[in-house]
Image: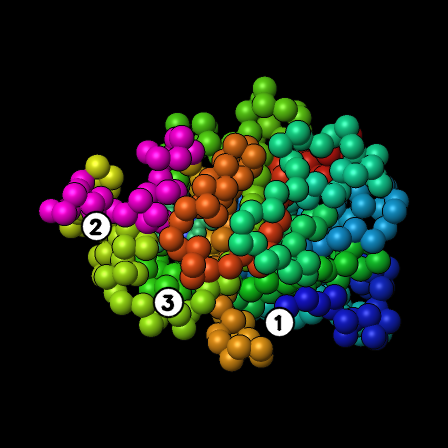
Amino acid sequence: MSTSDAPERRTGVTRRAVLTAGGVAAVGAVVASTHGAGASTDSASSIPFFGKHQGGIVTPAQGHLALGIFNVAASDRQELKRMLADWGRAAQRLTVGLPLVETYDGSYPPSDTGEALGLGAANLTLTFGYGPSLFNDRFGLSSRRPKVLVDLPAFDGDELNPAFTAGDLCVQACADDPQVAFHAIRSLARLGLGTVELQSLQLGSGRTSATSSEQRSARNLLGFKDGTNNLRGGDSALLKRWLWVGARDDQQWMTGGTYLVARRIQMNLSTWSSTPLKVQESVIGRKRSSGAPLTGEREHDKANFEALDPHGFPVIPLGAHIRVAAPETNGGVHLLRRGYNFIDGVDERTGNLNAGLLFLCFQRDPVKQFTALQGDLARSDNLSQYVTHVGSGVFACPPGLGSNDELGASLFD
Ligand code: HEM
């Protein structure tokens, strides 16, 4: 779905109106009151907004996703800087379950759109990222571009739809309630009116990855357990090596940050569901019921890629998804996968379900990690016959903020 929050445009509500009706001034004022007496923040289901790293990365994956991709319409560096600071202040409020403002002036359209009132924080996280095109010198940022932040190359089989591809900024909103996640992106889009335009809003329901050892694996729309062999929040040594940007990696402002790759992957569900179970299992390399590798009994048994069947063929076929993707065969690369199922009605042309996986993954170096791995998968993964990549983006996600920091300040200053 591609939208630019057109109803607000038609009613002539501009960013200035949102702001003067209590937006930024009040956001600033009332943010302070979240720390004071009387503010009804929802601490029981809040993920801390401030910290060394942004939320929504190693945070145990919530049930719902709203992914907003934005392009900057303004040409003024200060305006972009101000908007990012406004977004940071708004995010502080939204992630503790507060509306954008506390009080409303009936003479103006309400600053907060209201659909999340009473729903609490629902463990909302907002993860901000900057795309390569933000650094193309419109804003004097070219010297700040990390060298690994480059557009992803074209992979075999890609059929990218421009509506779901690239983008200057992204905001990943994840929450236990879909309306809370939607409200967050909608609110940021309204706060950014005149400065940014929403290129796409992609909704995902049903996490496909576990990012904490307490979480059970969920299933993707192919019916298989997904996220079994994933990096998790507790894997400190692996996270240091494969997830977080180190102080000597590149740009200082990215230390403690990470890179998000977002791929919209359409599944051909009718072909998949007419495929015999044994073939499905050999395509993935795991059993559908238990999630165990074809060489094991239980989900977390280690896959044995050396095992041969009585005819001398590998039990986990050479083109099985897990064999091609596994660190044992891919040169040691790990990713933190954090994807969601999407279901977007019926494809008018084919009558098939328009559904698949919003594949999101975080990593320290997208060139050496996602790009290298996806190159192998595009060439030799048997799963490629059932899926098509239709959207793509890569974003630098800066580290988390301290309580006195402004979002975006480290990028500009
Ligand atoms: C619609 C597309 C995809 C589907 C349905 C899918 C599904 C799965 C499933 C069912 C597993 C086994 C369980 C697990 O360990 O998570 C798996 C593993 C994995 N997938 Fe995918 N996947 C897709 C795309 C991708 C892409 C694009 C990448 C990376 C470029 C990727 C990387 C991995 C990795 C690294 C593993 C773990 C392999 C291991 O160490 O065992 N997947 N995937």
Q: Which residue is mark 1?
A: 115
Quarter of the image for residue 202 reads bottom right
Which residue is pictured at 50% across the width and 37% down the height? 372
Magenta part, dominant SS: loop
Name of the residue lying farthest toward the front = 311
Q: Which residues are magenta?
A: 307-333
* Mark earlier in primary sequence (2, 3): 3
**Residue sitting nearer the eye, 337 or 352:** 352
Which residue is pictured at 21% across the width and 37% down the height? 306
Quarter of the image where the N terminus is located: bottom right
Residue type beneath disc 2: Leu
Instruction: Report the Cα–Cα distance between label 1 and label 3.
Output: 38 Å
Instruction: Report the Cα–Cα distance between label 1 and label 2.
Output: 46 Å
Residue 301 visible here: no
Structural crowding at the residue carrying mark 2, measured as other residues with C-alpha within 10 Å and reported as few (<14), some (14–19) or many (≥20): many
Q: What is the basis of the colouring in this image?
A: rainbow
Measured from the top left, where is residue 321 in percent x and y? Answer: 36, 49
Q: Is residue 375 above or below residue 74?
A: above
Which residue is pictured at 18% across the width and 50% down the height? 298
Quarter of the image for residue 269 reads bottom left
- Secondary-structure class at tag 1: loop
Q: Which residue is mark 3?
A: 272
Residue 288 magenta-highlighted: no
Structural crowding at the residue carrying mark 3, measured as other residues with C-alpha within 10 Å and reported as few (<14), some (14–19) or many (≥20): some
Residue type beneath disc 3: Trp
Measured from the top left, where is residue 248 in percent x and y? Answer: 59, 19
**Residue sitting nearer the eye, 340 or 408:** 340
Question: Disc 1 or disc 2, which is closer to the eye?
Answer: 2
- Secondary-structure class at tag 3: helix
Instruction: Report the Cα–Cα distance between label 2 and label 3.
Output: 19 Å
Measured from the top left, where is residue 183 in percent x and y? Answer: 62, 65
Name of the residue lying farthest toward the top = 248
